[in-house]
Image (spheres, rainbow, N blue to C red):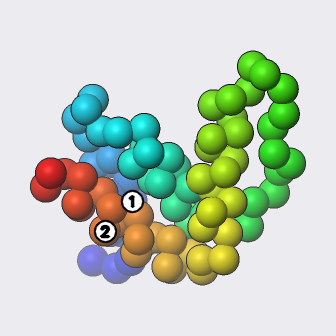
Amino acid sequence: MGLEEDFEKAAKDALTLPASTSDDDKLILYGLYKQATVGKINTSRPSGMFEQKGRYKWDAWKAVEGKTKEEAMSDYITKVTQLKEA
């Protein structure tokens, strides 16, 4: 399989991760997924006291902003594999 097929499989596998998966790990996956599928972050950081979740997600995406699509896909696949094995 190619990188994109492996990435799509990992994205499906991510939906079946245990509920005990930490929020930090979920945010890492979110950031990598967005970087791989959308690319450079294209929105402004949410503000306001009721948008804490949005800020966490934005920060996770911003943290991987320099990665190429291929790097983000590869890192995403690796992270999902690690979480499945844990």
Residue 17 in sight from this viewpoint: yes
Please tell me which residue lies in front, 64 or 16. 64
Q: Residue furthest left?
A: 85
Question: Residue 4 location in percent, x, y?
Answer: 42, 71
Q: Nearer the viewer, mark 2 or mark 1?
A: 2
The crowd level at tag 1 (other Cα within 10 Å; few <14, some 14-19, many 20+) is few
Residue 38 in sight from this viewpoint: no
Q: Is residue 32 left or right of residue 39?
A: left
Residue for point 40% across, 75% down:
74
Q: Residue furthest front?
A: 49
The crowd level at tag 2 (other Cα within 10 Å; few <14, some 14-19, many 20+) is some
Q: Is residue 40 left or right of residue 1?
A: right
The part of the image, by quadrant, that contains residue 10 is bottom left
Q: Determine the secondary structure under disc 1.
A: helix
Point out the tag, 2 or 1, that comes first from the N-terminus. 1
Question: Residue 33 location in percent, x, y?
Answer: 52, 57
Q: Are marks 2 and 1 in contact (CB under 8 Å)?
A: no
Using the image, determine if residue 66 lies above or below residue 54: below
Question: Residue 59 location in percent, x, y?
Answer: 66, 51
Residue for point 66% across, 77% down:
66
> What kind of residue is marked 1?
Glu
Residue for point 70% across, 39% down:
55
Tell me how far mark 2 sits from mark 1, CA to CA.
Answer: 13 Å
Q: Which mark is residue 8?
A: 1
Question: Residue 3 location in percent, x, y?
Answer: 38, 77
Using the image, determine if residue 25 lies above or below residue 17: below
The part of the image, by quadrant, that contains residue 52 is top right
> What kind of residue is marked 2?
Thr
Q: Name the quadrant of the N terminus.
A: bottom left
Q: Which mark is residue 78?
A: 2
